[in-house]
Image: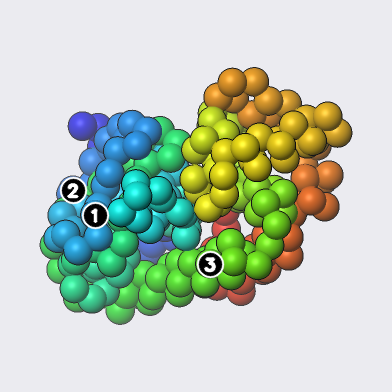
Amino acid sequence: MKPADREQNGFLKSLSERDFEVLKPYLKTVDLPRDMKLVELGHPIANVYFPHTAVIALVVEFQTGERVEVALIGPDSLLGVFGVLSEPVALITAIVVLPGTASVIEIERLRAAAKHSKSLRQIMARHSRALYVQAQQTAACNALHCVNARLARWLLRMRDLIGSDRLDLTQEYMAAMIGSRRNAVSLVAHTLQQSKVIRYSRGHIEIADPEALKKSACECYGELRAQFQRLKLSDRP
């Protein structure tokens, strides 16, 4: 494993020099493959992840095998914040939806550092609030808004996190993440492609007209961005 790259993660970049120097010896860079399960509901949390290029989804899993995403974590934040601030047991399952790299630290190392640093605890509390807000908004969005609005919102959020218009995602994956059927997502994707808002080929999406996609999205996209700004969080480090 390589040494951690502070500049590629918003949480690490926001730390004071003192807090980062405490964590630095214990941070390593790892590769996260797609579909890797990082934590599982009810299981102990061993590590905390700070994505660089990977995107992680917090998902609710059902007995049927279906999954629905309730929050996305990318280079803007960290996975495992609730386990640091409270008990180190997973409250939800987390999987990698876009492969990439991340910094990782043993959770007990971060818990020990947070215990002795008020500034570190304050930053972590801000990120935990942002995650809670995102989960709330996503749950409401999935319950009330139509498939095309939810898909547009989700694609824009992914675009913000990775800083690219190109996304390597299948329709099956997108459908699962927004709690929809694959054929419904296929119809919406076809309409967006016909309107030249996106370009889609098997497993690859390019957002060709972000402004038009924003018009298709529901209010949840703008509300989340506004909430993050109020909490002094950005989509990218």
Q: Residues within 10 Å of mark 2 (few under 14, many from 20)?
A: few
Quadrant in the picture for residue 131 = bottom left
Give SS at disc 1.
loop
User: What whole-number distance in Å separates the C-alpha atoms at marks 3 and 2?
Assistant: 38 Å
The relative height of residue 98 versus residue 48 in the rendered view (above or below) is above
- Pick whichever of labels 3 and 1 is earlier in the sequence: 1
The kind of residue tagged 3 is Ala
State how far apart marks 3 and 1 are (Cα). 20 Å
**Is residue 44 shown above or below 119?**
above
Disc 1: which residue: 40
Residue at label 2?
25
User: Does residue 12 show up?
Assistant: no
Decide which of 186, 16 is in the foreground and name it: 186
**Amino acid of disc 1:** Glu
The tag earlier along the polypeptide, 1 or 2, is 2
151 relative to 214 in the view: left or right: left
Q: Position of residue 13 (x, y in %)?
A: 43, 54
Residue extending farthest to the top is: 201
Protein image colouring? rainbow
